[in-house]
Image (cartoon, rainbow, N blue to C red):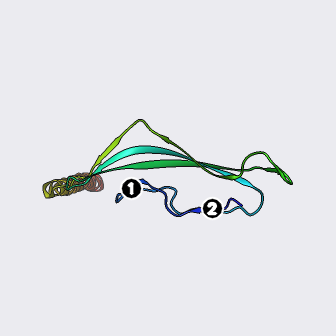
Amino acid sequence: NTSHSIHRLDFGKRVRGMQSPLSGTTKIVKNGAYMFHYYIKLVPTIFEGAGGEQVYTHQYSVSDAEKNVMARKGDLTGLPGVFLVYEFTPFLVHKVEKAIPLSSFLTSLCAIIGGVFTVAGMIDAILYRGYKQLRKGNQK
């Protein structure tokens, strides 16, 4: 029976906000003999926090395949089991956490408020001109 459960799988130190795609994976085999393959692509990553501390770890993506290798009663077409096949990518990701200053937030807020007032003014002008046209048409 190759039923299995992966509680947690990390490659390197765990960093806040980093995903672990295989964590919580459960596969249950009810009958037959199964071969499970997990193809893992590891990406070396440096996380740099807002305080300047650096953590070297790995992120990963995964795809999986499963196959019933029991052809007939007692005959196997493959080796039942759970196989983790991994490869390193030739890239290094450097993620830097930066705090957004209050001035940037205030600038964005002012831009949004200005945009709302501009659109409201345009809608008001269109409605006013339409109203004037309707009044002019009714007076003739």
Q: Residue at x 39, y 56 (%)?
A: 18
Disc 2 target residue: 4
**Closer-to-camera residue (78/51):** 78
Q: Secondary structure at mark 1?
A: loop
For label 2, count other residues whose C-alpha is less than 10 Å away and answer few (under 14), some (14-19) or many (20+).
some
Q: Does residue 92 lie above or below 81 as drawn? A: above
Q: Is residue 118 left or right of residue 79?
A: left
Q: Which mark is residue 18?
A: 1
Question: Mark 1–mark 2 contact, CB under 8 Å?
Answer: no
What x and y, as percent, mark residue 74?
85, 53
Q: Residue furthest right?
A: 73
Specify which label sits upstream in the sequence, 1 or 2.
2
Task: Name the quadrant of the N terminus.
Answer: bottom right
Q: Amino acid at mark 1?
A: Met
**Closer-to-camera residue (15/132):** 15
What x and y, as percent, mark residue 20?
46, 56
Q: Please tell me whether mark 1 or mark 2 is closer to you in this view.
A: 2
Q: Residue furthest top?
A: 90
What x and y, as percent, mark residue 95?
30, 47
For label 1, count other residues whose C-alpha is less than 10 Å away and answer few (under 14), some (14-19) or many (20+).
few
**Closer-to-camera residue (64/44):** 44
Q: Can you tell which quarter of the image residue 116 is in?
A: bottom left
Q: Is residue 88 left or right of residue 96?
A: right
Q: Secondary structure at mark 2?
A: strand
Q: Amino acid at mark 2?
A: His
